[in-house]
């Protein structure tokens, strides 16, 4: 095993040893196997590249390119060009994954679930550190500085981890680094011809010269690395605890009792528009309920109650243990009619949401696992990596049935609540308030204003449901939506909530699912296209109340209709004891809906946030052109050495003009250089110190040439000697034929891998880099010479001036 191969293997081991410190941060260890396989591919490409050429920067660049392609194949294959090349959609998907991963880090306590975003961050970090370690220790042969990226990786992991296993991971990472240093030292000393194990007793002995000279530099470097390592080890852990939330703190309470912990802001609608356009309506859950009004049975995930002008998002809230009986909903008075219902819900294994979908308002929840309760939004949040994947639970909930008179006669909300939920950013355009006042002109109370806003959006205002409209939830998106009057549920719910706030009505936006599709067995199936967003407005005595402004989606609440019909559809009964509530395999009725109707929203299409892979935004013509050019560049760069080699060979052997002795000599020397470069391509490096005859003998011996090729080499060497030493060189014929014979002999003795390497990655192509370097050196010398002459001229002028005056 060569020295560089040993170094590459040790660099791989050192990186993976330090990466093990990340294991306590995530609930599963499957990601590290994925990182190890991709890191092995990255290291293998580096080993192959270093065998084919000596360019260090080119080797690191090729490894980085292969790393990008590998991440694309693993995390963004469906969005990539040809499944490999990272096009605009793949880049957009990477950005969304990184954003989702960052939000997950800020939301979960350790150990966190291995979501796609967190996996991308972990695997990408390991690959970046591995690339740095391989480049420093193997490509540039400097193993000591390679400890810095390893230390950074371990320090971050140690600062985030919560537990007493830090010493074990430190020892593992330290052993990996020491193994790398030992391999580098052995490789360095082996180039002296033998390994010296001690120092000479004499001050000037041979051992002192050989051991001391190469030894002092590593010692000094090691001391510097140690000082920097100590600084990083002290500073990084001190900084990390200052970060709050998720992985940096007790985001979900850490499973501890006593009501501690918070839930940080996270926007679940990042990829909603892209998911709305997905063709597959994958089932996410089924439920049985005894509700008498299934059309109003919305499953609510969480509420977005903070609007900062850029987006709607949930506020940071304190979490508590889940009580046996949830408190009475805020604002609900005793005079409003209330019916309690029971629902059994089964989530699919593919649906891994942190928030538990619940009918609003839930009164009690019977569920196993680690869950926490957020009182303001009345939501249940998974703790310690707990998700909805495959869970079954039973929910008791209230069906609040206010009348129009009760809503119209609602008292003013509490001042603190009104102040919090009517707050709008200063960047909100004036047109929002003006439009709200125009639409609600003539309304006598907040209830009539809310119904007027709902009816204006859903039927009277000329709005059109379209999932292809440019997404956005900020103030500019709201103004654009009011102008163009086309969008999807996000635009309708966010805009109505903002307009209600400008009118002084407390408002927020709920995210969840519409009722779903009834099945033959009495269950109800909820699919991706049932995900939805709707506004909730607060009325004192009733509490938070649902409205439905989005046309062709969901159903308008009965208390907003002119005549409230009595429910005539009885809901399915609760499942019998022991009866399975697994998600049904029966396709929903909307599966056969035409594509055009889906796009118009007639089929109730939508998708749950973060489930289906987004299709990405439409790229402009300039962006597409740039990516196409980039892809072409990636495809063209690898064969460039092969094309350059073929062009040089044709130029050397195809010259037939000129009959002077100088022209004949140039053709002979060109043919000899072609033979030397061909041998170099096949692994026989040129030796400029040898005569043509000695060089021919060396080429025959190392190349294993047969008699025919050997004779051709000697004929070419004799022609070179005639050109270099004879007073009058004799004309030589058949140069091209002899070169072809030699090339065929080298290819026959090289074997298939050698022939492939000589064709695809010829070593002699490095002459291009040498030529560019030489040209740069000539230009530098030329400019230096000019500047020198100018300085001497200026100095001579100064010396002559006093003489002229004298």
Image: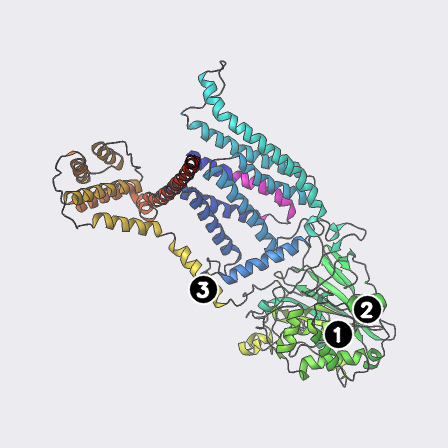
Please tell me whether residue 442 is drawn above or below residue 776 in the rendered image: below
Residue 329 visible in the displayed image: no
Instruction: Of the two numbered discs 1 and 3 on the same chain, state the one appearing first in sequence.
Output: 1
Residue 402 position by quadrant: bottom right
Quadrant in which the N terminus appears: top left
Range of magenta residues? 13-29
List x then y, in percent, for residue 430.
71, 74
Please tell me whether residue 430 is drawn above or below residue 61 in the rendered image: below
Q: Is residue 19 magenta?
A: yes
Please tell me whether residue 266 is drawn above or below residue 803 in the rendered image: below
Q: Is residue 744 magenta?
A: no
Residue 473 visible in the displayed image: yes
Numbered label attached to residue 500 = 1
Instruction: Of the two numbered discs 2 and 1 on the same chain, state the one appearing first in sequence.
Output: 2
Residue placed at 86% from the left, 72% from the top?
333
For disc 1, the neighbor class at 10 Å (few under 14, some 14 to 19, many from 20) is many
Residue placed at 46% from the left, 59% from the top?
83
| Mark 2, residue position | 418
| Mark 3, residue position | 625
558 relative position to 621: left or right: right
Foreground tag (2 vs 3)? 3
Look at the numbered discs 2 and 1 and tell me whether their residues touch, using CB distance below 8 Å: no
């Amino acid at each position: 095993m060569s020295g560089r191969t040993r170094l590459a293997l040790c660099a791989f081991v050192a990186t993976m040893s330090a990466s093990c410190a990340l294991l306590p941060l995530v609930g599963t260890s499957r990601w590290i196997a994925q990182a190890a396989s991709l890191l092995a591919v990255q290291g293998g490409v580096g080993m192959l590249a270093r065998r084919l050429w000596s360019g260090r920067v080119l080797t690191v660049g090729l490894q980085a390119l292969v790393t990008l392609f590998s991440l694309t194949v693993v995390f963004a294959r469906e969005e990539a060009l040809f499944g490999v090349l990272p096009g605009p959609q793949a880049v957009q998907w990477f950005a969304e994954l990184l954003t989702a991963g960052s939000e997950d880090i800020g939301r979960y306590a350790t150990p966190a679930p291995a979501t796609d975003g967190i996996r991308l961050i972990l695997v990408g970090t390991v690959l970046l550190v591995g690339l740095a370690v391989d480049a420093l220790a193997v490509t540039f042969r400097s193993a000591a500085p390679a400890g810095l990226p390893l230390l950074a990786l371990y320090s971050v992991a140690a600062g985030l981890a919560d537990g007493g296993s830090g010493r074990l991971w430190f020892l593992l990472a330290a052993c990996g680094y020491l193994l790398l240093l030992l391999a580098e030292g052995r490789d360095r000393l082996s180039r002296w011809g033998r390994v010296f194990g001690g120092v000479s007793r004499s001050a000037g002995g041979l051992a002192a010269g050989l051991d001391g000279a190469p030894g002092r530099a590593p010692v000094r470097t090691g001391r510097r690395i140690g000082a920097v390592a100590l600084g990083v080890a002290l500073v990084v852990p001190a900084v990390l605890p200052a970060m709050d939330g998720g992985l940096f703190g007790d985001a979900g309470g850490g499973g501890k009792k006593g009501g501690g912990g918070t839930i940080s802001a996270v926007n679940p609608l990042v990829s909603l528009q892209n998911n709305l356009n997905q063709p597959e309506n994958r089932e996410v859950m089924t439920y049985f309920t005894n509700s008498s009004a299934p059309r109003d049975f919305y499953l609510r995930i969480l509420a977005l109650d903070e609007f900062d002008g850029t987006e709607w998002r949930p506020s940071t809230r304190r979490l508590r243990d889940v009580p046996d009986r949830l408190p009475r909903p805020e604002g609900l008075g005793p005079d409003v009619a209330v019916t309690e219902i029971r629902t059994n819900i089964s989530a699919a294994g593919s649906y891994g949401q942190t928030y538990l979908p619940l009918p609003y308002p839930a009164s009690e929840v019977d569920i196993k696992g680690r869950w926490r309760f957020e009182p303001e939004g009345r939501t249940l949040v998974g703790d310690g990596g707990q998700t909805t994947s495959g869970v079954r639970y039973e929910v008791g909930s209230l069906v609040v049935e206010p009348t129009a008179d009760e809503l119209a006669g609602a008292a003013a909300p509490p001042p603190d609540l009104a102040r919090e939920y009517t707050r709008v950013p200063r960047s909100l355009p004036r047109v929002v308030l003006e439009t709200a006042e125009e639409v609600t002109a003539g309304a006598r109370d907040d209830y009539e204003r809310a119904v007027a806003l709902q009816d204006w959006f859903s039927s009277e205002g000329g709005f059109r449901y379209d999932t292809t409209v440019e997404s956005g939830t900020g103030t500019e998106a709201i103004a654009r939506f009011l102008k163009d009057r086309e969008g999807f549920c996000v635009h309708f719910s966010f805009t109505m909530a903002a307009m209600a706030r400008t009118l002084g009505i407390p408002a927020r936006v709920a995210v969840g699912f519409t009722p779903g599709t009834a099945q033959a067995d009495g269950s109800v199936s909820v699919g991706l296209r049932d995900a939805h967003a709707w506004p909730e407005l607060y009325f004192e005595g009733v509490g938070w109340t649902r409205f439905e402004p989005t046309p062709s989606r969901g159903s308008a609440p009965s208390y907003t209709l002119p005549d409230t019909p009595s429910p005539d559809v009885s809901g399915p009964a609760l499942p019998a004891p022991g009866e399975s509530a697994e998600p049904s395999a029966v396709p929903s009725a909307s599966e056969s809906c035409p594509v055009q109707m889906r796009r118009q929203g007639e089929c109730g299409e939508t998708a749950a946030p973060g489930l289906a892979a987004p299709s990405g935004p439409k790229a402009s013509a300039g962006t597409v052109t740039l990516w196409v050019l980039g892809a072409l560049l990636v495809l063209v760069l690898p064969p460039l050495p092969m094309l350059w080699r073929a062009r040089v060979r044709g130029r050397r052997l195809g010259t037939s003009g000129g009959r002077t002795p100088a022209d004949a000599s140039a053709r002979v020397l060109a043919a000899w250089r072609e033979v030397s470069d061909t041998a170099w391509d096949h692994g026989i490096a040129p030796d400029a110190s040898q005569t043509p005859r000695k060089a021919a003998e060396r080429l025959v011996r190392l190349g294993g040439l047969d008699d025919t090729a050997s004779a051709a080499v000697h004929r070419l060497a004799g022609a070179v000697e005639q050109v270099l030493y004879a007073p009058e060189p004799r004309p030589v014929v058949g140069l091209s034929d002899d070169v072809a014979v030699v090339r065929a002999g080298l290819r026959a003795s090289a074997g298939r891998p050698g022939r492939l390497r000589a064709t695809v990655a010829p070593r002699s192509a490095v002459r291009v880099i040498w030529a560019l370097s030489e040209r740069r050196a000539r230009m530098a010398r030329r400019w230096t010479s000019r500047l020198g002459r100018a300085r001497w001229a200026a100095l001579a002028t100064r010396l002559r001036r006093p003489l002229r005056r004298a």
